[in-house]
Amino acid sequence: MRQCVQAERLLWPLGSGPVMSGPPTPEHVLDAQGNSSPCRKDEDAREGTQSSHRMLGFSDALLSIIATVMILPVTHTEISPEQQFDKSVQRLLATRIAVYLMTFLIVTVAWAAHTRLFQVVGKIDDTLALLNLACMMTITLLPYTFSLMVTFPDVPLGIFVFCVCVIAIGVVQALIVGYAFHFPHLLSPQVRCSAHRALSRRHILHLVLRGPALCFLAAIFSLFFFPVSYLLMVTVIFLPYISKASSWCRDRLVGRRDPPAPSAEVFSFDLHEPLSKERVEAFSDGVYAIVATLLILDICEDNVPDPKDVKEQFRGSLVAALGAYGPHFLAYFGSFATVGLLWFAHHSLFLHVRKATQAMGLLNTLSLAFVGGLPLAYQQTAAFARQPEDELERVRLSCAIVFFASIFQFAIWTAALLRQAETLQPAVRFGGQEHAFMFAKLALYPCASLLAFAATCLLSRFSTAIFHVMQIAVPFAFLLLRLLVRLVLATLRALRSLRPPQPLPSQAPEEAQSRLLPSSC
């Protein structure tokens, strides 16, 4: 037993953590293949426990799916061919998109609380696994409650049921905390051996229950004045940042509190610390993969010709029937390329990130929220052929979704540059060999979508052609981007070399004085 503990400490020393900020997580005690050490496996078998690594992967995948499928009620907004894309329809879509963004961000708050929770809980047993499954089952009900909210916006029942689900998630997570602290062998070694175990329990309970507490108030207000409920649910999203701002103001007015005792600094759970890079990447990859998969669902559902129509309208020619769906397939290929290239830009950025800040985490969540809206952009572009009279508004909506999904990626890069010595690898910092290329890669989609939006304002008759040209041109620009960046940099160096060299101001008096002095022998 003592050898196992010593081996575990060698794999996971106290006070150490990953390159990313934040406390160490149970994943870091695994070997290169993602398996536990043999000593630890024997110890877990005797205690009836197991590593939480695979369960966390399952939970991350499920939460990313739930957050992404929130867009489906928005994409399935029924607009008849006779109905124009007027202000009433635009207002309906805007309302549904706003509610989607709010619920998406609330799901990410639940994911962050779940991640923090299993930084405290290092192992699981059968009871803990069942409690986690109950938490996941409750989370899977959120898309249904969101559908009620957007379908019946004036009926408070949808808001009430959504808040009840969030409260249930918090209650189950609190039960996990109580169960794990009742059986300390399930806790991570740092918490189990700490003299401040009760403080850690209060800390993590505060984290998992603060959102459900606000949703409890929102559920009450939904019964008689539901606009306050929406305000309280938005507060759930920004509560960590409000708490940090209030702490900063309190420190400015009253003075900074005394630092914690040295024994408490070995393992702490700062509510304002960003999550580990690996968990953020896993959740982000899940969102991108699910969005890319959702695009094909409408192709499979709506673009398979009916055998009766093929026989009557196309004289039995399946090729001619499929040709009628050509614009839909064009919209699918363009939308898939957009999702794939945005993922590639995200992957390239986080490949060079050493440490994430809290601002970078918030910007990444906002970017993922608009990435989740890309199926709606596909729906709008696929409707060009059916409703050409509304193509201008649909093109602008699609450009806006792509712009916000990409501009928040660029904002992550900008936030990282503000603390580049701490957050970025040397190659992509100011003056690094990859800095200009990374800048161009992240700026390509914001510039292209903004240019397409502006072009549709000037050339509204060609809005569809402009949008399709953007979708086709951007992938080719990605292929030629490194060459284009090198050409631009070489041109700038050539122009700089053509300028005559100017002496420095500090050298001019010395040169004038040297002419007055006699030359040396």
Image (tube, rainbow, N blue to C red):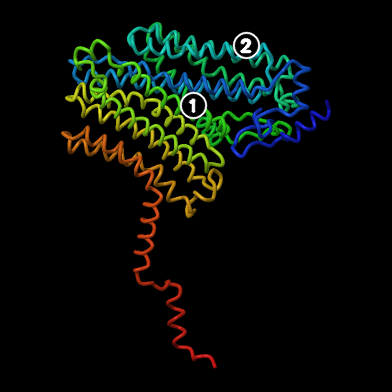
Q: Residue 199, can we see it?
A: no
Q: Quadrant of the N terminus?
A: top right
User: Quadrant of residue 86 in the image?
Assistant: top left
Residue 191 in sight in this render? yes
Position of residue 516 in the picture relative to residue 75 (left or right): right
Crowd tier of the residue under label 1, counting other residues whose Cα lies within 10 Å: few below 14, some 14–19, many 20 or above: many
Point out residue 151 in the picture as x, y percentages from the top left corner: 33, 10
Nearest the eye: 191 or 3: 3
Res 10 quadrant in image? top right
Which of the two labelled residues, at mark 1 and mark 2, occupies the earlier sequence position? 2
Which residue is situated farthest in the front direction here?
316
Kindly report which numbered mark, 1 or 2, lies closer to the viewer in this rendering. 1
Assess disc 2: are there few (<14), some (14-19) or many (≥20) residues with their C-alpha within 10 Å of its C-alpha: few
In the image, what residue occupies the spot 44% across and 81% down?
A: 511
Q: Is residue 158 above or below residue 352?
A: above
Relative vertical location of residue 504 with respect to residue 422 in this rendering, above or below: below
Side of 399 relative to 245 (left or right): left
Q: Is residue 482 left or right of residue 267?
A: left
Q: Nearer the viewer, residue 68 or 264?
A: 68
> Disc 1 and disc 2: Cα gap in Å?
23 Å
Can you identify the residue that label 2 sits on? 130
Which of the labelled discs sits on residue 304, or is there none? none
The image shows residue 177 at horizontal and vertical percentages of 65, 16
**Residue 175, x across and y down, in percent:** 63, 12
Q: Which residue is mark 1?
A: 286
Callout 1 amino acid: Gly
Q: Quick one: SS at disc 1?
A: helix
Amino acid type, mark 2: Leu
Residue at position x 43%, y 8% from top? 160
